[in-house]
Image (spheres, helix red, strand yellow):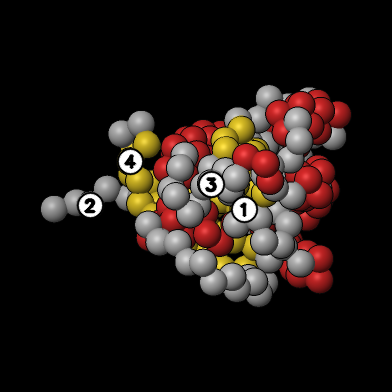
Amino acid sequence: MLTRKKTLLKVIILGDLGVGKTSLMQQFVNSKFSQQYKATIGADFLTKDLTINGKTVSLQIWDTAGQERFQSLGVAFYRGADCCVLCYDVTNEKSLNNLASWKDEFLVQLNVLNPQDFPFIIIGNKIDVDESRRIPSLQKKLMNITNNQLGGMNYPVFETSAKDSINVELAFEVVAKMALQQEELNEGARNDINDDYNDAINIHLENESRGCAC
């Protein structure tokens, strides 16, 4: 019996230290949440199989360190990424303001040819906290950052709670769909390059067989 080949999708989660990147990943993949905080060293990843649009995919989620001293490792961890999650803490305005820096660093490290076309999603985590602790005028600030610092891109935005598992599944389903679309675009581009290469080889061989010195 033939088994259907899974499509591997690589997703990177970026954001400041302590915004809940690890907790989001653990909640989505393992349905677990821990109150004990432990900073990620370098990067770690978990994998979860999903069915998206009738296609079996293996979503490989990379949780990266929020400390600046690990950002130089980005080029190795980001390579092959199909989607990027920009994560902030709804109680920490600095983590929201830093989203643009995380995005820019990612695009530079990955050397994206068409940055305006690369899929990003924004997640504001920790909505389980008391309303009074949240960033004042959060939606207005988020809109301002999206328009002025993130290039005015209409990125999907989700507010989540890794602790209470609010909107986590929904957010990552959208992430998986965006990643799959990007992978299919990349695959199409690779096929076009291969077709052009094969056409060039065939033309060269035909010219040789005709004795053409082209």
Q: Determine whether, in the image, residue 48 is placed left or right of residue 187.
A: left
Q: Amino acid at mark 3?
A: Asp
Mark 4 Cα-neighbour bin, 10 Å: few <14, some 14–19, many ≥20: few
Mark pair 1, 2: CA separation: 30 Å
Of the pair 114 and 198, the residue shown nearer to us: 114
Q: Amino acid at mark 1?
A: Ile
Mark 2 Cα-neighbour bin, 10 Å: few <14, some 14–19, many ≥20: few
Residue occupying the far left of the picture: 1
User: Residue visible at 48% across and 66% down?
Assistant: 34
Q: Quadrant of residue 121?
A: top right
Counting residues from the start of the chain, the first of labels 1 and 2 encountered is 2
Q: Name the quadrant of the C terminus.
A: top right
Look at the numbered disc 2 and give the secondary structure of its residue.
loop
The answer to whether the residues at label 1 and label 2 have Cβ atoms under 8 Å apart is no
Look at the numbered disc 1 and give the secondary structure of its residue.
strand
Q: Amino acid at mark 2?
A: Thr
Judged by depth in the image, the label closer to the viewer, 1 or 3, is 3
Mark pair 1, 3: CA separation: 20 Å
Counting residues from the start of the chain, the first of labels 1 and 3 encountered is 1
Which residue is labeled 4 in the image? Answer: 51
Which residue is labeled 1 in the image? Answer: 13
Give the number of the disc on residue 3: 2
Residue 166 in the image: state x and y as whole percent: 45, 42
Counting residues from the start of the chain, the first of labels 4 and 1 encountered is 1
The answer to whether the residues at label 1 and label 3 have Cβ atoms under 8 Å apart is no
Look at the numbered disc 4 and give the secondary structure of its residue.
strand
- Tell me if I can see residue 155 in this picture: yes
Residue 99 drawn above or below residue 151: below
Which residue is labeled 3 in the image? Answer: 128
User: Residue visible at 44% across and 56% down?
Assistant: 27
Q: Amino acid at mark 4?
A: Thr
